[in-house]
Amino acid sequence: MKLELKYGTRSIPFEVVRAKRKTVKIVVTPPDQVVVTVPMKMNKDQILDIVQVKGKWIVQKIDYFKEFDYLPVKREYVNGELFMCLGNHYPLYIEYDSDIKKPEVMLSKDQFIIKTNMQSKEVIRKAMEQWYRDTAKNVIEERVKYYQKYFYIEPKDIKVKEQRKRWGSCTYDNRLLFNWRCIMATLESLDYVVVHEMSHMVHKNHSKQFWSFVEAILPDYKARKLWLRNNGIKMNI
């Protein structure tokens, strides 16, 4: 269902999704998409009232994304194209070899090298994504192990998956789920995501106690979080 927010002189359309939940969730994604998830039985007037209350925040989010002249990432997968890893940019170098069975990806000191037997953007993209997923899994597991000394609870599982709208999450039974794109962030910001989700093993909300817990481990967490906010839209392939 589509509805519209009236805020001052602006009209902002938004999508309504009904789900089995007790609270309303509002998500704004670049450049100006607004999705509002609501309880199954909430009526139209109630939805509009709640969204209206959050109108200022929604408008600020949309205007924030406009500051970055947001455009969807469009990759060409050609030699010299830059790809991120741990906050650094590396040029792509492609080697075509008809003798290999499947693409091979490696990160040398100063470039991504892909060996492939097919001149296909989609084949290269899939190979790159798999490399990012595998690398993210290894690095994140290492960082969770490093920060475990601050926690009396251990995660039940650690997984890296597709999560376009969040960097990570923690389930009710302490399974940690991470967006594979995290590996593109600086190590400092990646650590923030790791500590953030691990802290949810202790506090299942974003209360003052939660943020105090995060700050006790990472006193500069706000700067790390800000880096993600400013650079997250670039972290894609």
Image: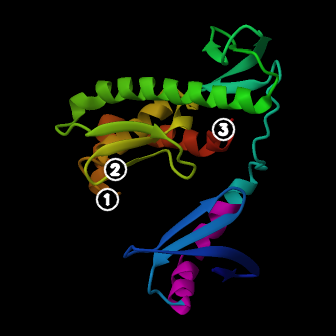
Compared across the picture, whether 88 is left or right of 135 comes to right
Which residue is depicted at the point 35% across and 42% down?
Answer: 176
- Amino acid identity at mark 1: Ser
Compared across the picture, whether 174 is left or right of 15 comes to left
Secondary structure type for disc 3: loop
Q: Main secondary structure of the magenta part?
A: helix
Crowd around label 3: few <14 · some 14–19 · many ≥20 (10 Å): some
Q: Which of marks 3 and 1 is nearer the N terminus?
A: 1
Residue situated in front as seen by the camera: 124 or 224? 124
Question: Residue 126, percent across and down?
Answer: 66, 31
- Amino acid identity at mark 2: Trp
Res. 207 mark: 1
Asked whether 39 falls inside the magenta stretch, the response is no
Residue situated in front as seen by the camera: 92 or 226? 92
Q: Mark 2 points at which residue?
A: 211
- What are the residue bounds of the magenta stretch? 44-62
Disc 2 and disc 1 in contact, CB within 8 angstroms: yes
